[in-house]
Amino acid sequence: MATSRKAALSERPAAPAGRRPPGRTAPKARLSPAERERQIIDGAIAYFSEVGFSGQTRELSKRLGITQPLLYRYFSSKQALIERVYQTVFEGRWNPAWVSLMRDRSIPLRERLVEFYRQYSAATYRPDWLRIYLYAGLSGPVLNQRYINHIQRELLPVYCREVRHYCGVESPDLPVAEEEIEFVWSLHGGMFYYAVRQHIYLLPMRVEFMRKVETAIDNFLAGARVTYPRLIASLHGAAAAPAARRRR
């Protein structure tokens, strides 16, 4: 009896090469340090965009399928992880070429603005970016202030000078005033709020975004032709006399 059982066992076909016996799972592939760091960052972006920065790293670790000590081997603290999220979501999506586009006077200003908002919205007006931006403001305004300061330092002064040129009141010696920055924010902030209504409030948007962009830019430039020369004159007086008739 024992002999026949051994014979039966010996007659069982061997498992095909590379195939594991039933009931055994293949071990998980070990990630490289760079891959593991990327996994943590991507997971943190998704997690914080869902629950805000009050979310706990213990829960994040569970979602990632790793231990909390392993997470802290890559990021020494929760704040260090949040800083990397900021760098990835905000600094990492900023494109310096947008400033060059804004300065390119071989292209009419209207076309430059339309193209800028087409590119900028594709990079930033996305659910994860918007949710993290708003959650950051609720948790503490430091990250938002950094991003707004970056916009006001890198983009908006160029924006204002191009509007000056468009309105025929270009004067390179005159510094850009805060009132000019606020004038431009009226357009830039409107674009942002459209994205908030769409991706945060989940409202039905019956006007396609780029159609909205073109209409808003047309309204902005039409108003600028009337009000911007007066604004510059009120800020700078005779020094801001029109340099030429309106140029486009």
Image: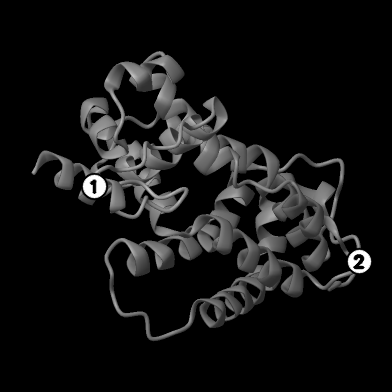
Which label's residue is closer to the chain start, 2 or 1? 1
Left or right of 214, for residue 72: left
Residue 230, by quadrant, is bottom right
Pick the residue in front: 9 or 18: 9
Asked if residue 144 can be seen in this view, the reply is no
Quadrant in which the N terminus is drawn: top left
The image shows residue 166 at horizontal and vertical percentages of 79, 67
Q: Label 1: few (<14), some or many (≥20) within 10 Å?
A: few
Q: State how the image is colored.
A: one colour
Asked if residue 121 can be seen in this view, the reply is yes
| Disc 2 target residue | 244
- Circle nearer the viewer, 2 or 1: 1
Question: Which residue shows up at 55% across the image and 62% down it?
Answer: 121
* Marker disc for residue 7: 1
Question: Which residue shows up at 63% across the image and 50% down it?
Answer: 180
The image shows residue 141 at horizontal and vertical percentages of 37, 32
Pick the residue in front: 63 or 214: 63
The image shows residue 108 at horizontal and vertical percentages of 82, 73
Q: Label 2: few (<14), some or many (≥20) within 10 Å?
A: few
Label 1 sits on a secondary structure element that is: helix
Left or right of 30, for residue 135: left
The image shows residue 211 at horizontal and vertical percentages of 55, 83
Q: Is there CB contact under 8 Å for labels 2 and 1?
A: no
Amino acid type for the residue under numbered disc 1 = Ala
Q: How many marks?
A: 2
